[in-house]
Amino acid sequence: MKKEPGAISEARRWQDLRARAIDATFDADRRRVGERVAVVFRWLFLIVLGLLNNVNPHTGTNAKVTIDLVLLAWAVMNVVVNVLLVRGYQPGKQFSLSTMTLDILFAATLVYLSDGFSSPFFLALFLAVITNAVRFGATASFISALIVAGIYLFIGGSFTPANFTLDPNATIGTMFLFLVVALTTGYMTRELERERRSAVERAAEADSLREVSMSLVSNTDIKDVFDVLIGNAVQMTTADRGRLIFSSHEGFTVVSSANRDGSTPAPEGEPIDEHQLSQASGTGEAVFAVDGKGLVIPIASGDDVTAIVCLNKATGVFTNQDLFTVNALSGSSAVPLANALRFQRSRQEATTDGLTGVANVRELRRRLDAAFARPDRRETPLSLLLIDFDFFKSVNDQLGHQHGDLVLQMGTRIVRAAARAQDLVARYGGDELAVMVADTNAIGAQRLAYRIVDAVHAAAVSTTPGQHLTFSVGVASYPEDAFTASELIAAADQALYLAKREGKDRACTFPQLVTELELADGNLISMLSEAGPQVMVAAAHAADHRNPLAQGHSSRVAWIADAVGRRSGLLPNQLEDLQTAAFLHDVGHMTLAADGENLEAPGHAAEGARIVEGARFPPDVVAAVRNHHDRWDGVDQAGGMTGEQIPVMARILAVTEKFEALTAGRGGPRLTSKEALDQIVARSGLEFDPAIIEALGRAVRENIFEVSLPNVALPATPVAPAAATA
């Protein structure tokens, strides 16, 4: 899944928390090590000082006993500390401060009880100076050295402020010795601290890299992989912003961007230093900008494509540490990136036409289905253009398929150039293209069709000797011309049929074909016979234009009938015939006198069957049109079929037409699917086949109608309920 800027910042926050946790752990380890060092030094000092005390001939017996008691107390403290450390005690700051204070206290006591700093016991004070550097760092060691120097001056002995003038060099030298030891041990400790900090950063970075790698591996969407990679590259370095750029033989393409603050990335059209990018992709080495504010690092991914991380900052310069970080990130992401590229390439091959480079028909249908599944589809217009390469067969026959392929490629480029960036261009068939025009109504789609026709004229692409490429274009739009994706394709295809029939090299719209069918009069059967399924959707729309209350009726019936037919166990060829019958079930109205008061004209079913039969549609389609008003119980119908004598497709049409009328509000208030089903169930075994009602009920319980059933806008004044659809 995609990692948004806020998610990247959150990841960075957790990385900082992990770093602080690791640092706290290392700090505790340092104190534990400091206490162990102090224990070792104490034993060393205690042994040496004990020997010096007992072998010194100038020390009295009482003084020796007193000093031994102090050394014994100090040894007991050291044993206690040693036992605690051996048993796994984790010393805190308070513990270390306590042991440091006791060390200074015992050392000062020894100095005070002996000959002052003339005695060797003042060396015990060096223990605090050295171990404090390990416990708390250079600053604490220096401060303890100053404290020891103060003790040296103000605790009794031969060197005090009173006799400072007697031997100032010795006094200053001794104090200087304390400070030198503090500075030396402090410097060594600071270097160890720097290494520790570096280890903390590397540990946190390694932890972050592990998470990045897991995130990259779990993502197969290449855009998500790119976003994760560049987002972490920015957050893990001192960069302010970054871009991931593809370098190929076609040039440089920005595929992802990220900013440190999570704000909207800079537009992809922002200038890039192509010289640096060329140098990085050509050599495979990182390139620093002249001013140090830019860093370009290539990630070789094969297949003549190099992914390049391009980082920039407003102030300061990039360091080798930044380079090391991005190199580590690049190394951890190389395999996931290659996998994502391979996955994307496989998916692209599955959705892209290999010859023209545009989407294939499978991807077109998927995108259309997705558009019709959008929650706001009823408020969002959508248009479809079908484009036919005129006389393309002659190109292949006369000049061969290789030249035909070249014409297809050049024609596709013309269409892509004329379409908008957000429009989907797809290869629909051997010599047909489709353009899915998002958020565009019929007028906008028609303008695009005219623009494409003009563009192919201007290009003057040679086809056969003396001929140039031309297009025939069919245009259909939602919701004016279709309620479903399949109906929109059929409407555009039928508009394309009209364009080719009218002489090619032109654009025609679906409403133009509908109008022609409305004006057909006595030529309707011959037109249907000539075109057949190529105009059946247009014929349905022409039939629905007879009455304002019939708008969208046939389209909705076809959609509902398909859902019920699938749940009734119809075979694929039967479903196709059912769709045809659903679109043509009211075609009889086109040759009957219009009746503005009645939605259904008497005799329209028989008249429709006559037209459909004359146009040579399959017998099952004719029977469905003829009998779709027959009642299951045969009441009030002379010579009609009853029960299972009625063709199954006619029984389906009877139920779906009633359900459509109730849910559309034709002749009464608009009902929900559940309310409409309840009314139909009340007529089960009387007017309608119970088995078909059960299939309708399954569809209603699956909630497909409430979610996807297209709405219609009907006049405010409905016809009387008695005149509603039977």
Image (cartoon, grey):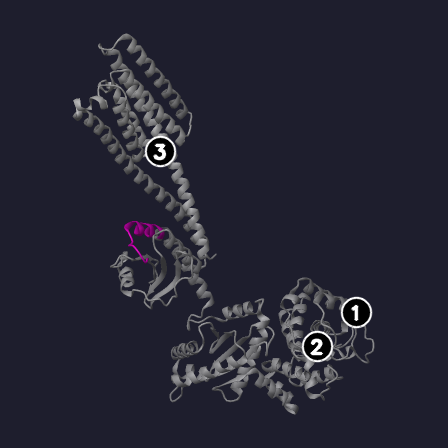
**Kind of residue sitting beneath label 3:** Arg
Along the line of sight, the residue nearer the viewer: 650 or 129 = 129
Examine the rendered structure and indicate whether residue 726 appears above or below residue 35: below
Report the Cα–Cα distance between label 1 and label 2: 20 Å
Locate residue 726, reporting x and y percent: 76, 76
| Disc 3 crowd, CA 10 A, few/some/many (<14, 14-19, 20+) | some
Select label 3 or label 2 by which is in front: 3
Along the line of sight, the residue nearer the viewer: 268 or 250 = 268
| Disc 2 crowd, CA 10 A, few/some/many (<14, 14-19, 20+) | many
The magenta stretch spans residue 324: yes
Which circle marks residue 624 in the picture? Answer: 2
Along the line of sight, the residue nearer the viewer: 397 or 553 = 553
Along the line of sight, the residue nearer the viewer: 714 or 192 = 192
Instruction: Tell me the residue that label 1 is attached to.
Output: 683
Say what secondary structure mark 1 lies in: loop
Disc on the earlier residue, 3 or 1: 3
Which circle marks residue 395 in the picture? Answer: none
Instruction: Tell me the residue that label 3 is attached to.
Output: 30
Select label 1 or label 2 by which is in front: 1
Disc on the earlier residue, 1 or 2: 2
Marks 3/1 in contact by CB < 8 Å: the verdict is: no
Left or right of 683, for residue 393: left
Q: Taking the image as drawn, is residue 46 in sight?
A: yes
| Point 26% across, 15% down: residue | 114
Report the Cα–Cα distance between label 3 and label 1: 87 Å
| Point 46% across, 65% down: residue | 350
Q: Taking the image as drawn, is residue 470 in sight?
A: no
Examine the rendered structure and indicate whether residue 504 appears above or below residue 146: below
Say what secondary structure mark 2 lies in: helix
Give the residue furthest to the top.
61
Q: Which contiguous range is marked in magenta?
A: 313-329
